[in-house]
Amino acid sequence: MINISNYMPSESGYALRVDIGLWFSVWFSYGVPVAFCTPGCRPVVSENVWTRSTGKHIAHIAKGWSGGVVPHAEFEAQYAAAMWRLRTVLEHMDDIELMRRLENAAKEETGK
């Protein structure tokens, strides 16, 4: 399930969060990804290399996260890696479901 929400109601349409299931979230400022979070990893927030308004969005996202912000180049590298993992999972979703069904069928046959 994909959910799109506004993380700063006063910035309607400019500060959006996209959640893909329970395992991937991306925060956007004016359509640009500025933070993301995946299971088992701390949230990653880019330093502000854009405008003052985006800086406010980043500050809002980063408050309460102990990790703070990372240099933008590091953010881009981590975001690209996370997107590659997400794309790989989505491309193989049917394969993963088939493997689970086969495993379950094998367990039922053997009684384990």
Image (tube, helix red, strand yellow):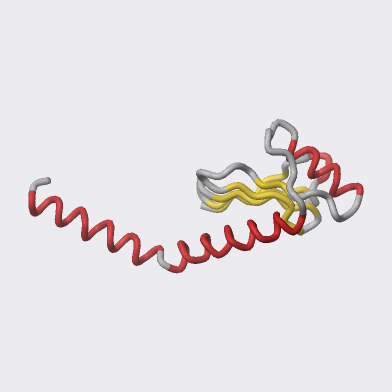
Residue at the far right in the pictured view: 52
Residue at the far left in the pictured view: 110
101 relative position to 63: left or right: left
What count of labels does the image hold? 0
Image x and y of residue 86, in percent: 52, 60
- Quadrant in which residue 98 is drawn: bottom left
For the point 52% across and 65% down, which residue is it? 87
Q: Nearer the viewer, residue 49 or 13?
A: 49
88 relative position to 10: left or right: left
Residue 53, placed above or below residue 30 = above
For the point 78% across and 39% down, which residue is it? 9
Residue 94, placed above or below residue 106 = below
Image x and y of residue 4, in percent: 64, 50
For the point 68% across and 34% down, which residue is it? 65
Image x and y of residue 111, in percent: 8, 47
93 relative position to 60: left or right: left
Q: Nearer the viewer, residue 23 or 13?
A: 23
Image x and y of residue 38, in percent: 55, 48
For the point 60% across and 47% down, which residue is it? 37
